Structure formats: structure tokens, C-alpha cells
């Protein structure tokens, strides 16, 4: 199993598209956040914690890491290497688990790096300009949520890739569902059922992205409920992806 | 040794492989022949666990492919030379494959040298010609130093030197006691290297066994004769039940053996300048054997299909 894991990691780091997207997922939020720290706050104090502000960038990082997950599976099909992968390791469950662990590892490392690159330079910039910021109790939870959200979005991408077997289909589903379709679907459902509170059932925006919030209203799901709901949503795709991957002819 | 027993695979209502059985013996090169769409690649994919057969089994020394630990060290395969990420270098392509089966990096360099690609080791696969990709595919097949080698069209896209080299590699592998199963459309090349043949058509077995048996069964044989008294000899041959086909130099006698023709000529004091038994090529034998099972057939070029109609 170690050999398969090493092989999957090696495949990821020797693929240019994957490296570029993973780099973007780290660097893009870091640049935006550093520029914000440099120009947005001129003096005084920030009425929020730095971590909670960084939390707003985590969905972007998570979605980009989801694209890394998609590429991890679809590139095997588009380049034909899936046949060699399965000839080298005929146990498909082992291959699936290796891909899952690799994708999660890459996403956790990427989001940790992103947090580091966002927080450390910003803290230095703001401190040097005597701008104060709060450290609040929910910071640790936001940091933990950032890691969980990114890892889950990455394996959601991997699973969508295994289901669709093509990058355009899987990436479209991964990006369009949370950014456009989920809002439309739950907006229509709210109208149909005359209930404005239905958005809390939206799996990604209403629960996944909500994980990195600092506060939860009483009419929203709690952090734990959101985590459970979002995990179950991702879990369904992981199971479907695993079953299709195991049963389909290569 | 490879044993395929009653292998059956359907895609929807179409039977791609139909109750196919054959074996591949160690120390011999076995050619796997069949027209396009006859089920050769499907059979190979089923053997390697890539496609799940509806029925039947393929074993390598008694074990199914999916039951073998580190399978690359037992069975090496080349299914499609295009199965490589275009952005990876040749060496990195081999390295990720090697890692899965615990094969060392030094073996990667060794097989790159074996296939003559040591200078292109750090070149991206996307920059390779089809011939270079075939060589890389062969390197993948040889990576684990396997006892069994399965090659699907290994000479596709290779130049004459490359084709000859592939042939030598297959012969060398068989001489080392390995089982070699190779599918190819280059029948002349195959006839030069194969010891045994497995011929299939529309997923069914047509013939299996030594290449000599196949030729005896399916290749046309005739007797070529050059003689100043050809017409006299032709009349005598016709009287014995043979048929005659006139050529500029002499003629060909069918349905009669060279020995009989020789005896007739001797008994009648007919001078012979040439008397030679002739055998058709593997290509002709293959076309004869698979004629009934060709699924996709081109139009005859005797009526020129490329000529545009005149306005």
C-alpha cells in the first residue's frame, strides 16, 4: 500500500496542471489577503480576528483543491494511464483509497500553507503599522474547519472525477453547483415551500462553507450539524465514485 | 504459462469474445491474430483484469491476474503505446509504475537502456514519435522482468530497424523461457517470429496451435513448373485430376503434389527446368481462415471508389 501511495503522490507532483492549480489555491488567497492587509486598513484597529477574515478565503482554496482532486482522477482517463494504474495494481479499492489519501494529504498541506502565507505576512504588516486585531475563541475552530472543508472538497472533486471520467464535466459540477445552482435550487424551494429557512439544507453553501464562519445564528445549523450534514453529502459521492471505479471496465 | 478457458465478454447485445479458449506455452512466441473488431484487445483486457468477463477465466501459472501480488514482476503488458501522460518525462512515467510494485529506480534506468531510450529519459512523452512511445510501452512491459509478456501491436509505428529490434526482443524473451503473446497486423513480421498462432474471428476461436499446422490447414499450395514441353505435361497433369494455370515462364499446377508431377514427367521423358512446391503467405492463409468472420470490409479497388463522378 505504501508503494501505491508513493506512486499516487509522485503522479500528482509530476503533473503540471495539478501543480499549477494547487499553487494557485495557496498563492492566490495569500496575495489577496496580504494586499488587503497592506491597503485596506490604514490605522486604528480591525474589529475582527485575522483568522476569521482568512476563513472567508477558504472556500476559494477548497474549490481549487477540489479541481486538483478532479484532475487526480480524470487525467488518468484522458491520458489513458488508468489502464496502466489498474494493471500495476489490480485491487481497485487499494487504488481508490490511495487516491483518496493522497488528495486529502495534498489538500491539508496546501491549506496549511495557505493559512501560513495569509496570516504571517499580514500579521507582520499590520503589527508594523500599529494596527491591532482581535484573537477570538473561535479562531481554532475556524482553522480546523478550513482543513476539513478543503480536504472534503478535494475528495468531492476526486469522486466527481471518477463518476464523470472527464475534467470538463466534473469541474463544471464542482464549481457550478455551489456557486450558482445551489442558490437557484434552494431559492426556488424556499419560494415553493414559502420557507426562507431552507437554505440551511444547502449542502455546500449552507453547511460546508458555513463551517469556517465565526458565528452561527439560532435559525442555522450548528457547527457540528453542518459538519455532519456536509460529511454525509460528500460521503455519498465518495461511495458512488468508489463503486463505479470498482465495477466499471477500464 | 497462460491458460484462457471459455472466456466470454459482451458489450450490450454484442458478444465481443465468445467462449474463447487457448493457451500460451513458455519459451514460445504466440501470435494472436484476428480481423479488426474480432476481440483481440478485449481478450487481452479481460486477461489483465481491466474488463470483467461475463464467463470464463484466464490464468497465469494457475493464478488469475487479480490474485497476483506485484503483478508487473510476473506479467508485463503493452496494450496501447498512447497510455502515458504527455507532460511526464519517460523516466518519471516508468518511475510511478515501478513504485506500485516495489521495483527499484535502477531497474527503470536499465529498461530505458534496453529499449534504447536512455538519451530521451528526461524528455516529455508528448514530444515522442509513435515509435518512441512504442519503445516506452515495451519498457513498461519489461519493467518487472516478467515471466509472461503480453504485447498488443508492439511494432505499430516503428521504423524497419525498430520492427526488427522488436522481433529480436520477442525471440530473446521466448528463448529465455518466457511466454510471449503478441497481437499484430503485420503478418509478415509475425510469420518471422511466431512459433504458435491463435486466430480468432468475431470473438470465436478459428485456429490454435503451431504456425506450421495453421499454414498446412489454410495456406494454398501448388507446384511451379518450367519446361520446354509444358503443354504436354499440362495435359498429363489434367488427366491425373490437377488444374493448370499458365504463367509467362511456365505454369502452376494445383490439386496435385510435386512428387506426382515429377513422376509423370520422368515417366514421359519430359524435360523440367524447374519443379518447386509453393506455399502461400501467412497473410493469404490468415485472410482465407478469417474470410467468414470479417466484420468491417473495404470495397474492392477494382471498381475505383475514389474517382469522383463526372458532372
Image: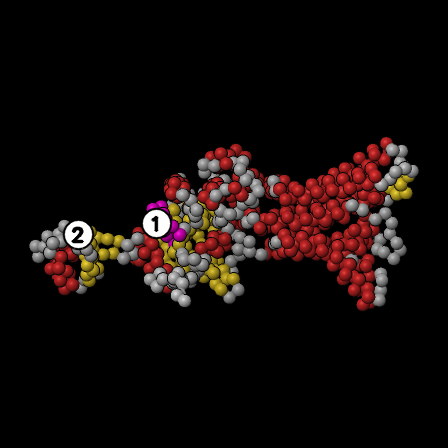
Q: Chain of mark 1?
A: B
What residue is pinned by disc 2? B275
Q: Is B78 contained in the magenta span?
A: no
What residue is pinned by disc 1? B188
Using residue B62 as the reference point, say whether residue A144 is left or right of it.
right
Q: Is B188 contained in the magenta span?
A: yes
Q: Position of residue B279 (x, y in %)?
A: 26, 53
Which span of residues is magenta-colored?
A: B185-198
Above/below status of B174 relative to A203: above
Label 2 sits on a secondary structure element that is strand
**Front residue (pair A101, A162):** A162
Using residue A238 as the reference point, say whether residue A210 is left or right of it.
right
Q: Position of residue A28 (x, y in %)?
A: 74, 42
**Quarter of the image with the C terminus of chain B in it:** bottom left
Residue at 38% x, 50% y is B186
Residue at 86% x, 31% y is A128
Q: Position of residue A6 (x, y in %)?
A: 62, 40
Label 1 sits on a secondary structure element that is helix
Whether residue A173 is visible to the viewer of this picture, yes or no, is yes
Above/below status of B296 relative to A97: below
Do the CB atoms of the residues marked 2 and 1 lie less than 8 Å apart? no
Instruction: Tell me the distance, in whole angstroms, between the alpha carbons under discs 2 and 1.
Output: 25 Å
Q: Position of residue A61 (x, y in %)?
A: 74, 45
Q: Are marks 2 and 1 on the same chain?
A: yes
For this orientation, the residue located farthest to the left is B269
Give the mark nearest the N terminus, 2 or 1.
Answer: 1
- Near mark 1 (Cα within 10 A), the count class, few <14, some 14-19 or many ≥20, is few
Residue at 41% x, 57% y is B35
- Near mark 2 (Cα within 10 A), the count class, few <14, some 14-19 or many ≥20, is some
Amino acid at each position: 500500500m505504501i508503494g501505491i501511495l508513493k506512486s499516487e503522490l509522485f503522479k500528482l507532483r509530476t503533473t503540471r496542471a495539478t501543480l499549477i492549480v494547487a499553487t494557485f489555491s495557496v498563492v492566490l488567497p495569500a496575495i489577496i489577503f496580504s494586499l488587503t492587509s497592506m491597503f485596506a486598513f490604514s490605522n486604528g484597529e480591525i474589529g475582527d480576528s485575522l483568522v476569521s477574515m482568512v476563513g472567508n478565503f477558504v472556500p476559494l482554496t477548497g474549490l481549487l483543491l477540489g479541481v486538483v482532486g478532479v484532475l487526480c482522477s480524470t487525467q488518468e482517463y484522458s491520458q489513458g494511464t488508468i489502464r496502466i494504474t489498474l494493471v500495476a495494481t489490480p485491487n481497485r479499492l487499494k487504488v481508490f483509497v490511495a487516491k483518496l489519501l493522497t488528495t486529502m494529504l495534498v489538500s491539508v498541506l496546501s491549506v496549511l500553507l495557505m493559512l501560513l502565507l495569509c496570516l504571517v505576512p499580514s500579521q507582520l504588516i499590520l503589527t508594523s503599522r500599529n494596527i491591532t486585531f482581535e484573537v477570538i475563541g473561535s479562531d481554532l475552530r475556524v482553522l480546523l474547519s478550513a482543513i476539513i472543508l478543503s480536504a472534503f472538497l478535494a475528495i468531492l472533486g476526486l469522486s466527481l472525477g471518477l463518476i464523470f471520467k472527464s475534467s470538463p464535466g466534473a469541474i463544471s459540477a464542482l464549481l457550478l453547483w455551489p456557486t450558482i445552482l445551489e442558490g437557484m435550487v434552494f431559492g426556488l424551494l424556499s419560494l415553493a415551500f414559502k420557507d426562507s429557512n431552507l437554505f440551511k439544507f444547502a449542502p455546500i453553501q449552507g453547511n460546508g462553507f458555513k463551517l469556517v464562519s465565526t458565528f452561527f445564528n439560532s435559525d442555522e445549523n450548528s457547527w457540528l450539524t453542518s459538519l455532519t450534514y456536509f460529511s454525509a453529502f460528500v460521503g455519498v459521492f465518495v461511495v458512488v465514485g468508489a463503486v463505479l471505479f470498482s465495477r466499471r471496465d477500464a | 504459462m497462460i491458460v484462457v478457458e471459455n472466456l466470454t465478454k459482451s458489450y450490450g447485445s454484442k458478444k465481443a469474445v465468445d467462449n474463447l479458449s487457448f493457451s500460451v506455452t513458455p519459451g514460445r512466441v504466440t501470435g494472436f491474430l484476428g480481423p479488426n473488431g474480432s476481440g483481440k484487445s478485449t481478450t487481452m483486457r479481460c486477461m489483465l483484469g481491466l474488463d470483467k468477463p461475463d464467463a470464463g477465466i484466464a490464468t497465469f501459472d494457475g493464478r488469475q491476474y487479480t490474485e497476483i501480488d506485484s503483478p508487473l514482476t510476473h506479467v508485463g503488458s503493452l496494450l496501447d503505446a498512447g497510455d502515458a501522460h504527455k507532460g511526464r518525462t519517460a523516466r518519471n512515467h516508468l518511475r510511478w509504475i515501478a513504485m506500485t510494485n516495489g521495483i527499484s529506480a535502477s531497474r527503470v534506468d536499465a529498461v530505458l537502456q534496453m529499449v534504447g531510450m536512455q538519451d530521451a529519459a528526461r524528455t516529455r512523452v508528448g514530444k515522442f514519435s509513435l515509435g518512441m512511445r512504442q519503445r516506452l510501452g515495451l519498457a513498461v512491459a519489461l519493467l518487472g522482468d516478467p515471466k509472461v509478456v503480453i504485447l498488443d501491436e508492439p511494432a505499430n509505428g516503428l521504423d524497419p530497424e525498430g520492427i526488427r529490434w522488436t522481433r529480436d526482443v520477442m525471440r530473446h524473451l521466448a528463448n529465455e523461457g518466457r511466454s510471449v503473446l503478441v497481437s499484430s497486423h503485420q503478418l509478415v513480421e509475425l510469420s518471422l517470429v511466431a512459433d504458435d498462432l491463435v486466430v480468432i474471428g468475431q470473438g470465436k476461436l478459428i485456429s490454435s496451435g503451431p504456425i506450421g499446422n495453421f499454414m498446412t490447414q489454410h495456406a494454398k499450395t501448388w507446384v511451379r513448373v518450367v519446361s520446354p514441353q509444358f503443354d504436354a505435361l499440362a495435359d498429363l497433369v489434367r488427366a491425373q485430376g490437377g488444374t493448370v494455370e499458365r504463367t509467362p515462364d511456365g505454369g502452376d499446377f494445383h490439386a496435385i503434389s510435386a512428387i506426382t508431377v515429377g513422376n509423370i514427367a520422368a515417366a514421359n521423358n519430359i524435360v523440367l527446368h524447374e519443379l518447386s512446391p509453393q506455399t502461400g503467405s501467412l497473410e493469404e492463409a490468415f485472410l482465407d481462415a478469417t474470410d467468414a468472420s470479417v466484420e468491417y470490409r473495404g470495397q474492392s479497388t477494382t471498381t475505383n471508389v475514389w474517382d469522383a463522378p463526372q458532372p
